[in-house]
Image (cartoon, helix red, strand yellow):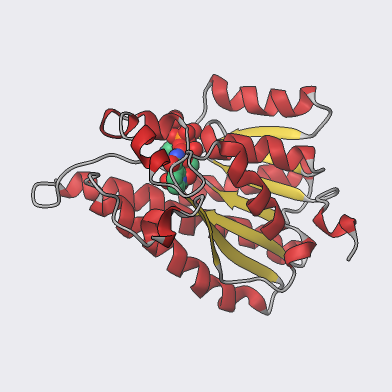
Amino acid sequence: MELSKFDLSGRVAVVTGAASGIGRATAVGLAGLGAAVGCVDLGGSDLEGVAAEIKRSGGKGLAVAVDVTDRTGLDGAVQRIEGDLGPVSAAVNAAGIANAERGEVMPSTQWQKVIDVDLTGVFFSCQAEASSMFRAGGGSIVNIASMSARIANRGLYQAHYNAAKAGVVQLGRSLAWEWADRGIRVNSVSPGYTKTPMTQRPEQANAMEGYAKETPLARNAVPDDIVGPVAFLLSEAASFVTGIDLLVDGGFTIW
Ligand code: NAP
């Protein structure tokens, strides 16, 4: 086994949700492994900041503002990344939102917004990225799902989020076989509780310490914990891995 199989040099990656948390750590991490990274998010200084951080470290980073629920906008974003950095052969879809409400009173608008961003946004992103990968002759997509695809989070009223994440896992299996004959692998990574702005929401922030105690590895994840497993799935070292969901939860779901 050659170490170079883990290397991402020469690859062009798209990372959605790149301005914050897991997406940001992934964008910076993939650039450190040699990839040129198209950083996609809603926009603002944090998005420009991640591209600037990549450039300061000697890498290639491009900030592109787009809403992942905008299918046409995503096509334009991927085309811009392809034009500036080259054909896309790696993609990580980490853009997402979370909030809470009890199932019996959750308004349809709240349900729909989370489904739109966390499930349909991932599907639209995969479609736009795959169109470039078809031109590149193949690639690897990693969707960021969640351990909430498999468990109900004790004390968190988020049926919409959990349903969307289960959808992301099944979406990955479905696209994995549909696109296998064109050289595209599709997998998901499912983080456990990770310290990011998303988990600083009032309904969750105070529970993080308790979650850490319930985790066999006895802590919450930090965004960098998620980057290695994602990079592995994008790399040639994972050339026979497709359609899986890789849990990165410190063992939280084993009991
Ligand atoms: P985060 O820090 O809030 O980052 C999410 C990023 O996605 C933000 O920059 C956000 O922009 C962006 N975003 C939101 N809606 C978007 C849209 N419509 N179009 C484009 N970008 C959009 O959250 P995170 O914790 O890193 O989460 C990253 C992914 O990991 C999410 O899919 C999340 O569900 C998943 N995850 C997180 C955890 C955890 O414990 N943190 C656990 C399991 C899975 P704004 O800030 O401007 O809204």
Q: Nearer the viewer, residue 162 or 184?
A: 162
Residue placed at 78% from the left, 44% from the top? 35
Which quadrant holds residue 62? Answer: top right
Instruction: Say which residue appears at 57% left-offset and 71% top-offset.
Output: 243
Is 211 drawn above or below residue 130 in the view shown?
Answer: above
Q: Identify which residue is drawn at 59% across, 34% down.
A: 24
The answer to whether residue 15 is seen in the rendering is no
Front one among 210 and 165? 210
Residue at image x 81%, y 33%? Answer: 59
Residue 165 x %, y %: 39, 57
Above or below, 240 against 245 in this view is below
Q: Position of residue 22 (x, y in %)?
A: 55, 39
State which quarter of the image contains the N terminus. bottom right
- Residue extending furthest left? 104
Image spot of residue 164 (x, y percent): 35, 57
Quadrant containing the C terminus in the rendered view: bottom left
In this rendered view, identify the residue nearer to me: 239 or 77: 239
Counting every numbered tag in the picture gives 0
- For this view, does 195 lie left or right of residue 57? left
Q: Position of residue 221 (x, y in %)?
A: 52, 40
Asked if residue 232 can be seen in this view, the reply is: yes
Q: Is residue 139 left or right of residue 244?
A: right
Q: What is the quadrant of residue 182 in the picture?
A: bottom right
Q: Is residue 31 left or right of residue 206?
A: right
In which quadrant of this rendering is ligand 1 seen? Answer: top left
| The one of 93 and 81 positioned closer to us in this rendering | 93
Up the image or down, 55 lies above or below 232; here it is above
